[in-house]
Image: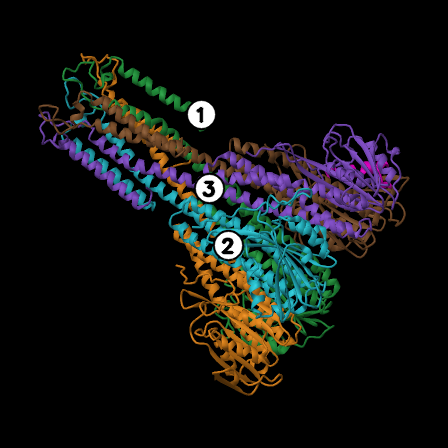
Chain colours: A purple, B brown, C green, D orange, E cyan
Amino acid sequence: MFRTKYSLPKTQPQLQGQGAQETVSTAPTQLRYSRYDHGTLEEFKASSVDEIPDPTPGGPVLWVEVDGLRDTALLQALGDRFGLHPLALEDVLNVGQRPKVEPYETHLFIVLQMMSMQGEHEISREQVALFLGPGFLISIEEDPLTDTFKPVHEKLRSGRGLIRKNGADYLTYAIIDAVVDQQFPLLEHLGEALDMLDTEVVKSPSQRHVQELHECKRLLAHLRRFVWPEREVISALLHDESGLLKAETKVYLRDCYDHTVQIMDLIESYRDMASGNMEMYLSSVALRTNEIMRVLTVISSIFIPLTFLAGVWGMNFQPDNQGQALSWNMPELRHPYGYPICIVIMVAVALFQLFYFRRKKWL
Amino acid sequence: MFRTKYSLPKTQPQLQGQGAQETVSTAPTQLRYSRYDHGTLEEFKASSVDEIPDPTPGGPVLWVEVDGLRDTALLQALGDRFGLHPLALEDVLNVGQRPKVEPYETHLFIVLQMMSMQGEHEISREQVALFLGPGFLISIEEDPLTDTFKPVHEKLRSGRGLIRKNGADYLTYAIIDAVVDQQFPLLEHLGEALDMLDTEVVKSPSQRHVQELHECKRLLAHLRRFVWPEREVISALLHDESGLLKAETKVYLRDCYDHTVQIMDLIESYRDMASGNMEMYLSSVALRTNEIMRVLTVISSIFIPLTFLAGVWGMNFQPDNQGQALSWNMPELRHPYGYPICIVIMVAVALFQLFYFRRKKWL
Amino acid sequence: MFRTKYSLPKTQPQLQGQGAQETVSTAPTQLRYSRYDHGTLEEFKASSVDEIPDPTPGGPVLWVEVDGLRDTALLQALGDRFGLHPLALEDVLNVGQRPKVEPYETHLFIVLQMMSMQGEHEISREQVALFLGPGFLISIEEDPLTDTFKPVHEKLRSGRGLIRKNGADYLTYAIIDAVVDQQFPLLEHLGEALDMLDTEVVKSPSQRHVQELHECKRLLAHLRRFVWPEREVISALLHDESGLLKAETKVYLRDCYDHTVQIMDLIESYRDMASGNMEMYLSSVALRTNEIMRVLTVISSIFIPLTFLAGVWGMNFQPDNQGQALSWNMPELRHPYGYPICIVIMVAVALFQLFYFRRKKWL
Amino acid sequence: MFRTKYSLPKTQPQLQGQGAQETVSTAPTQLRYSRYDHGTLEEFKASSVDEIPDPTPGGPVLWVEVDGLRDTALLQALGDRFGLHPLALEDVLNVGQRPKVEPYETHLFIVLQMMSMQGEHEISREQVALFLGPGFLISIEEDPLTDTFKPVHEKLRSGRGLIRKNGADYLTYAIIDAVVDQQFPLLEHLGEALDMLDTEVVKSPSQRHVQELHECKRLLAHLRRFVWPEREVISALLHDESGLLKAETKVYLRDCYDHTVQIMDLIESYRDMASGNMEMYLSSVALRTNEIMRVLTVISSIFIPLTFLAGVWGMNFQPDNQGQALSWNMPELRHPYGYPICIVIMVAVALFQLFYFRRKKWL
Amino acid sequence: MFRTKYSLPKTQPQLQGQGAQETVSTAPTQLRYSRYDHGTLEEFKASSVDEIPDPTPGGPVLWVEVDGLRDTALLQALGDRFGLHPLALEDVLNVGQRPKVEPYETHLFIVLQMMSMQGEHEISREQVALFLGPGFLISIEEDPLTDTFKPVHEKLRSGRGLIRKNGADYLTYAIIDAVVDQQFPLLEHLGEALDMLDTEVVKSPSQRHVQELHECKRLLAHLRRFVWPEREVISALLHDESGLLKAETKVYLRDCYDHTVQIMDLIESYRDMASGNMEMYLSSVALRTNEIMRVLTVISSIFIPLTFLAGVWGMNFQPDNQGQALSWNMPELRHPYGYPICIVIMVAVALFQLFYFRRKKWL
């Protein structure tokens, strides 16, 4: 069965005066940073923005990670320190936003939404905001409890692959790639649920299937709303002319773009499957109703006239006082072969109807 | 429950000869103006157009507010004073228009439609027309009773934010932003109504739900008709080359544009939800009919043949005068175990049918 | 109720050899012309093309009006006189054409379709062909009986407005505007019909509503087929580079363009309304069938088993000749409290079923 | 009734090794050619390609006609003689292709499909391939039995019109025009069939109508598949820059283009009509089922309880041996007014139900 | 009947760390290469990459074939030898990918998906990856057991046609052409299945048809997902500017492009057919239900009231002890003509109803 604990997030942007605290996770905000180049990797926890070193364009890559949106003062301090645009900082706080990329003078601002499976049945959505500047990347996650960038950290620590040999732009690619690829297990789960529904809906259609289908469709519509602009984001990065993204990194982003196209393709075919499934369900219910009606009609049509006949001969019309057989009142009841003839008539009526229904192909 | 007092406005433009008085609010038209720069803010009520000072490009910003469309003479005077194009003035009077932006030689003419919740269940639509010229902004509201620009006035008076530091173009942005953001509460209301319908429609489908769904869809279609061109309006302002909008203001308008995109996204998912809801409703009704039919068929099919049998043995065929058991007329009635055998036959027929219906999964 | 006398016109172009006389109005063709400038206005009826003066580019505007397509010789003469292209003249005769604009070397050829209400329930379509050349405009109407250009003539005669101050291009605008605006009353009529159907279809769905909806949809589809290219026509005129249309006139045409966009919007929302209406109707019928079935099922299911019981105890199995109570044949009939116990059993069965149906929410 | 002998052609291109003989007409291939200029017209039958004179660019127009695809050797010889591209020759043999235009170095290759009525109910499709080179046109028809180009030949022979005064490009236009215009009678036939179905489907819906609708829709889908690329073909010719088509001819092709647009419009409205028709049919069937159910429910609901009552009083419970009226077993049967009271009760039940059903508007 | 052993492939790309071995064929990977020019053709089996000669741009064409994806080391070695991009090699291992073309510095990378019939009912999908470099083509097939490129090898060996006279780009065309054309038999099979369903669904609609239709639609959706990007691939090759594809080869690719357009057309019309089929099925079921209901209603409505009447006269109300005819209790039973009159009443009721139902056209 397909069950999810996921519910459509409210995507209304917060009004400027209000804080974002009530809708976001209540766990405390964490601040970490890493510095690495080809040879070295340093990882630190920081308690304030001041501990973070200055980025050195051309030197080691500085990756500042903020986990959780509760501490708006920290975000503000970060914004002041790295010259982040106030509108972008405001967008960071509005969770559930449409993915987008905004070029500012000194940095690129990227918003992504990550839909992923958490455990068996739970589906979570997390907003990831990225600021890519010369020599640094700031990543801000909505939920401090999830460990979204674990695969990226592992790659960094292992020192294998290209990540340590490249700059902040390749790190950006690695994070986007992690976000995009986390949607595949979710889609696979959806695909399996739809496949299962496909066979079940024909065997025994029930309202539960419709609800599950509905749930799948809603989730697909939701995914689509996030993946579509995600594709635009990557496409915009591919055509970015700010110089923050090197041509070699764009080759890898192109691969990432292909993945979003593939996800869109999967979503579209799953939507098709869900519609086909619904159609199957409805046609199956219609056919079952039809079959039920047929049985009712055949049985009723055969026995109702017979019951009428039995009722007629069950009437109490009384012969003349003499009780003689030639009275006008139901003389057949007193005929020596009345009953056998009556049975023959009934069987004849029944056979005629059976023949008629068979010709109509209702039997 | 979802109830609205809103009805689709007639969007037919008035023919030229006719006045617009009958369709618009009958409250008297009010005229106000404000002048402000970084340091000062003056607000005045005016009784005639002549009291309004000349705009000073580069100097303090002049904001002329007209509330209500009843006093067409005042509008005419305003048009003469500020050199507004006659076609634009005509459009101001045609309420319920498609949002648009028209560049004229000396000014930009912007028409917006504001859909918003008034109280609990009422939904109102108001047309806002803006004339943006060098150093001045003229705003014309349809309904003098609503206080549409209250948040803008508050920002002006508080002196905080960027509004007092910028020109008439930023004021235009602030007004457009206020108009766009007022649609979010309405959408939230719609979303909640649809969410509620979603669960109710499965529990107990009734014609009332269809009507509410229908109402929601109509409202969504309506919103869409206004938001779509609103997006185009903001996009056109972003690409405006009249010089009336500064590049810094356009950064903020871009944010506003994102909001309209988000509203379009929400409208689309609500439309999807409404269709899915309708589908659920129909499938639910079909399944209920099917279930009802099943019960009717099972009970009828079992008892109708049995009733026929009872009817047969309730017939009054009479044995020979001698009343002897060997007559052809219903000898079974006189058999010592006739009744128990008859009961056994009936039970056998019923059991056979129960078995048959169970195999068909109708039980 | 929504009734129209309108039927989909045959839009097949006439083959070249055939005349167009059989499909067009049989009233005789009329020829008129007007000459006007800022100060003067002359109006004439002409019997032949020769009476028409030569157009004077830069001088007074010459407006030649042909009413009716019957007199093809007159059209031919007109074509020769003003150098109209033979293909354009052929198009004039093919009524029910798709609106279009064709630039020829010396003139612009414009075809429009005017859908309008005639009286209460009749809807008419008329083709208007315009030839705009330097200093002259030739207008050719399909039906001599309608008075399509009355508002234009009135504006000319009154001398107010801009029409007398401008050239043949403004006259073209005025005519297009009159054609476009005549569609608003028709749409209003349609909107009212749909609004009425909307409420009626829920109260008492009947096949008549479906037919009326069908009629509305057909008319909307038809309108759409004409308005869509009309919009293209105006757009093409806005981007015309023949020099026949002045920039000032284009400002007015832009307004006209807005009207067609608004008409398209209205048509789309009416189409949405009609589909929603149909959906309501179908769901309403489905629910009614469901309700009817429920009543039938409840009553049948309760009484059919009871009738069976009554039938059982109405059987005529006879006790032993001794008529003693201990016989196997229906001893209960002879039990002193047989009847009250039977009634109790029947009531119990009925109550059980009522309880069951209430739990199923069928009652 | 709408009956056609037309079946969807297999549009699979032949694999290279196979010949095309089995799918095309078996009548022998015919070869003809005409030469004409303003003053002269010569028409010849040819038995081999060698008899055909060389084309003279600027001189008289050479029109080579091949009727039938059976003689592939002839086609090969023709290709060698006129330098036709092998891929184009291959395409000629693949009947049922998508219309297209291919520019080759020395010639234009055009494929068209002609759908037309043959007699009353038969619809045929024929592929027409054209090679337009300097001073010559080669036309290759699929079926030697049809006389597709009769109207073109007649125009040539009559010497009227522009055809004799122009070159091979105008001849190309004339042929395309003939192909396009032959679709109008077919569409008219379809439109009439749909109009008839429209009224019949409401009067007496039957499965036959659905089948006819289905047939119409299939044919429309088919036509659309051919007309859509045909439009592209003409559009491509309008923008052709090979110099083979003169500007004057393009004016006429534009007219032809308008016709294809009009055909697309018609096809779209017929598709709309067919869908509306289907909707009407389904709603009509649903309403009829509803009405039938209503009658069944009213009659069953009234008489089933009454029959039960009659059954009760038809039971054979027997009074005490004494037969005295005060026994517990059915004393009412022995009440002097038992029967009238029973009738009154039955009438009351029936009236109550009638009242109830009338309030539910089922009567 | 339409049965396929095909199931939707999982199109999820493999995560980088994992091998691709579990999802691909387990047969051992094979390595072959061919060298050919106009005069010579050499074919070799190779056990390692080192045996393959260097490509000679301008000299004989080198075609390296890899059959099966199991031996990733071999693929890696091939990549190192020919300088293939690591991302492209990764894509080779991800089976079931979206077809695409990627230009790398020294070579073009092309991914295609081949859907084809295997035997009667089995449908297979195989991924084909091509690397086109100067003077060489590397083709990598997913499944070593299929003999996908047999027609290309045959053409090479026969020495006929253009393949031996051209370079690696023409070989690429030949392979793409083979991949595209293998889809035609599959489509023909689908078309025949749909044609058969079309006639069967009307004769005897059953759930089996819906399932088959569903299967067809799924397969069509699937094909479409592969053909659409295949078309883009060929279009990209047509506009390729790397110089690897000669203009003469592009003429042939254009023909290949036409084939994909034709396949898309076929898929679209088959989808239309399937929807129409479904519609027919549903309307057919609705009509059958309607017809069944009609029979039930007519028989029930006629006999239920008659049975009631028989029940009434079967009641046991007893006359006064005197048994005299004038008692209030059922005197009609003792009337000499009671029974004939009762029969007359019953026949009258039945006739009235028959008349009523005939007027309603239910008979």
| Amino acid of disc 3 | Pro
Residue C358 got which mark? 1
Between D163 and E138, which is closer to the camera in this rendering? E138
Between E357 and B153, which is closer to the camera in this rendering? E357
| Amino acid of disc 1 | Arg
The residue that mark 2 highlights is: E117
Give the number of marks. 3
Chain of the residue displaying label 1? C
Q: CA distance from mark 2 to mark 1?
A: 57 Å
**In this rendering, position of residue D279 left or right of residue D244:** left
Same-subunit check for callouts 2 and 3: no
- Image quadrant holding the C terminus of chain C, namely top left
**In this rendering, position of residue C224 left or right of residue D199:** right
10 Å crowding of disc 1: few (<14), some (14-19), many (20+): few
User: Which portion, as a residue range, is magenta?
Assistant: B140-164
The residue that mark 3 highlights is: C205
| Amino acid of disc 2 | Met
Chain of the residue displaying label 2? E
Label 3's element?
loop
10 Å crowding of disc 3: few (<14), some (14-19), many (20+): some
Task: Kindly tell me whether residue A239 is visible in this rendering.
Answer: yes
Residue B155: percent from left, percent from top: 82, 37
Q: CA distance from mark 1 to mark 3?
A: 28 Å
Label 1's element?
helix
Label 2's element?
strand
